[in-house]
Image (cartoon, rainbow, N blue to C red):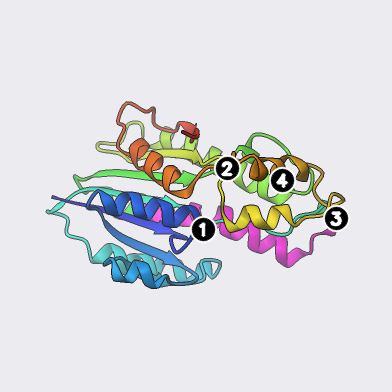
Amino acid sequence: MEKVLIITGGSKGIGKGIIDAYLANGVQIFSVSRSVNAELSKNGITQIELDLTHTDKLEAEFLKIFSLLDKESLSKITLINNAGTLGKIGPLEKLDAETIDKTIRLNTTVPFILSSLFIKYFRAWEAKKSIINITSGAALKPYFGWSVYCASKSAINMLTQTIAVEQADVKNGVKVLAIAPGVVDTDMQTEIRKSSKEDFKDIDRFVELKADGALNNVLTVGRKIFEMDHDYSLENGAILRVEGD
């Protein structure tokens, strides 16, 4: 029986770490990202190049992926809504309408749409079904200069909990988790450290985390997310956090 992962934003960063973990466990993987990664192609991963903020194209592209799967041979399928952006850092009044719109579209609208498609398409399938939404500690704590990011990730937490409520009485329903990977050593963290104190008052903390070697590693994060996906004792709708080794 086959296991399948469909992930957004898998070409680099946390997404790449997640893919490495699932690949090591024999999972068939489909990655949908704005860019493709040559290394992933060599490892037999199906990559779809798509700007996810073009939400009018999501349904057609994802239904193509779904149609490739065999209902009879599938034992587990996971959707990981990983793609996201910090957007522009700065107080809300400094942000233009297009930046606000694109950030919320990628961080929030896309996971809503994809989760809806996933639940609807696989409703009658007997395979175990799970959705993992990559959230952030910023969903629970406001940061100066991160209004759109904090709010969009907070919406993801509530989406996770609401899906769990809606799936509670569904036969073989979808298991959904929101997982915050912690502060991870990625390109996003590099951009954060380039911020000005004026736009991001907490910058010193993030600079110190890097200097102290306290950032989570993408491979460790990927492995722990895989473990959480396969831990059936976790409560549906749980909001979780990856802790470093």
What secondary structure is found at the residue carrying circle 3?
Answer: helix
Q: Quadrant of residue 96?
A: bottom right
- Disc 3 from disc 1: Cα separation: 25 Å
Q: Which span of residues is magenta-colored?
A: 94-118
- Disc 1 from disc 2: Cα separation: 27 Å
Q: Residue at x 76, y 64 (%)?
A: 97
Q: Residue at x 72, y 67 (%)?
A: 98
What secondary structure is found at the residue carrying circle 2?
Answer: loop
Q: Residue at x 30, y 39 (%)?
A: 173
Q: What number is the disc on residue 207?
A: 4
User: Which residue has dot 2 on it?
Assistant: 215
In this rendering, the answer to whether 204 lies above or below 85 is above
Q: Amino acid at mark 4?
A: Val
User: Which residue has dot 3 on it?
Assistant: 93
> Front-most of 111 and 149?
149
Compare marks 3 and 1 and give the one earlier in the sequence.
3
User: Which residue has dot 1 on it?
Assistant: 110
Dominant SS type (magenta): helix
- Disc 4 from disc 2: Cα separation: 10 Å
The image position of residue 94, as x and y in percent, is 84, 58
Compare marks 4 and 2 and give the one earlier in the sequence.
4
Q: Quadrant of residue 188?
A: bottom right
> Front-most of 103 and 220?
220
**Neighbour tally class for label 4: few under 14, some 14-19, many 20 plus, Cα within 10 Å:** some
In this rendering, the answer to whether 117 lies above or below 136 is below
- Disc 2 from disc 3: Cα separation: 30 Å
